[in-house]
Amino acid sequence: MRVEIWSDIACPWCYVGKARFEKALAAFPHRDDVEVVHRSFELDPGRAKDDIQPVLTMLSKKYGMSEAQAQAGEHNLRAQAGAEGLDYRAEGRDHGSTFDMHRLLHLAKEHGRQSELLQLMYRANFAEERSVYADADEFLIELAVEAGLDEGTARQVLADPAAYADAVREDEREAAELGANGVPFFVLDRKYGVSGAQPAEVFERALTQAWGERSPLQVIQEDTAEACGTDGCAVPSR
Amino acid sequence: MRVEIWSDIACPWCYVGKARFEKALAAFPHRDDVEVVHRSFELDPGRAKDDIQPVLTMLSKKYGMSEAQAQAGEHNLRAQAGAEGLDYRAEGRDHGSTFDMHRLLHLAKEHGRQSELLQLMYRANFAEERSVYADADEFLIELAVEAGLDEGTARQVLADPAAYADAVREDEREAAELGANGVPFFVLDRKYGVSGAQPAEVFERALTQAWGERSPLQVIQEDTAEACGTDGCAVPSR
């Protein structure tokens, strides 16, 4: 079974939702047969790489809330994160482009280190004093290496703005096709969707339901006459 | 709708099957909504990179057929390929490892050039006098550039045996899970499978059937209270 999770590093509910989903997955009897794929979704796709703002300034400018309201929201989010055992700095966080982070996450996917790198990026964004947006390249390379990626390769990906750019945009296009207009968005076997950082019990029910309904591939044409296998290729019959 | 095609560059029926499938797709009314993904399958996964043999020698040694039988098979395959408008050299082809080619195809996938590169690799393997296995790196880089990839990036991938190696093996693991023991193997929306280089009409029927049964995502939990969208993040409700 395959679970795809659309999320953004800058999305607090994605940070919380990943922890809740992983709690449900850890309790799921068939967890070893569940493949988790993280997919890209930028909440702020138009933002330039050098356009960095304090989170409170961004929230008040973009969403028209007062800085006090924004600050209260951050404190509430810290409480929610804390309930999942996650650190969260309610004050002093930055906001910026996450495009390069998504590109690196696609590199990590090719090396089986995607979930690890995403977790490190969340921690960097939500829990560390050092900004993941200012002097981003060096910080992101440190995270990539910590996640087990090769430093030179990570550096090449960051230096080439086209590397994995199509992969990020393709993920975002698929999210739109699937009807996701917010994140986190969980898709189980392309059959069921779960929107938002739901409680672990909701994920447990979704996993159980999708597992129960998974079906083997229906082979439309069994005649494998014109095919090659490890024991050779069929001789043409026509 | 998504069609995944497992194949190997060294597989004559994959070369023929790709043409037959593409003929069916070109005639399919919803072709612009069909995403095609090529996946890796090595017919000879244990072969070392420098272990290159004439195809006829490989066929007679590995499958116990006489060289005359093997030669007759190649001539039959040339006729089948010719019927699809494909060139095929029935004599003098080489056989070798396709692992590096599959790694390059994963690079091409990230840049949206996978189908083009696979077609060029097939042409190189089946129709050109120059061996795609001897002096492979330089030939493969030429093909990658012809397919629209950056030369330096392709060179880096070839130079690093770990690049996309996991992606190749993951594709092969999935093929085994789906029950594919030969190629080409076509999977439509992970629901229907078509094995072998079937006639275009079989692919047309499969596309029509899978299209008619595609279903929108069933959203288990609509409550998006704890999510972030482009218009901001929800304030915690708990």
Image (spheres, coloured by chain):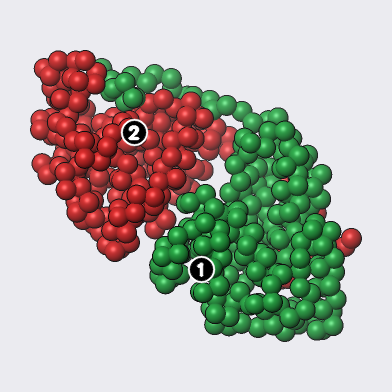
Chain colours: A red, B green
| Mark 1 surroundings within 10 Å by alpha-carbon count, few (fewer than 14), some (14 through 19), many (20 or more) | many
Marks 1 and 2: which is nearer the front?
A: 1
Judging by the rendered image, the residue that carries numbered circle 1 is: B141
Q: Where is residue A133 in the image (x, y as percent from the top left)?
A: 20, 42
Give the secondary structure at mark 2.
loop
- Which image quadrant: the C terminus of chain A? bottom right
Discs 1 and 2 lie in a common subunit: no
Judging by the rendered image, the residue that carries numbered circle 2 is: A45
Residue at image point 65% right, 47% down: B187
**Can you tell which mark lies on residue A153?**
none
View extreme (right): residue: A238
Q: Is residue B137 above or below residue B153?
A: below
Q: Position of residue B110 (x, y in %)?
A: 47, 51
Snapshot quadrant of residue A101: top left
Q: Is B20 on the left or on the right of A213, as rendered?
A: right
Say what amino acid the circle numbered 2 marks: Pro
Give the secondary structure at mark 1.
helix
* Residue B76 visible: yes
Snapshot quadrant of residue B210: top right
How many numbered marks are there? 2
Say what amino acid the circle numbered 1 marks: Ile
Q: Mark 2 lies on which chain?
A: A
Residue at image point 29% right, 50% down: A117
Q: Are marks 1 and 2 in contact (CB under 8 Å)?
A: no
Residue at image point 27% right, 55% down: A144
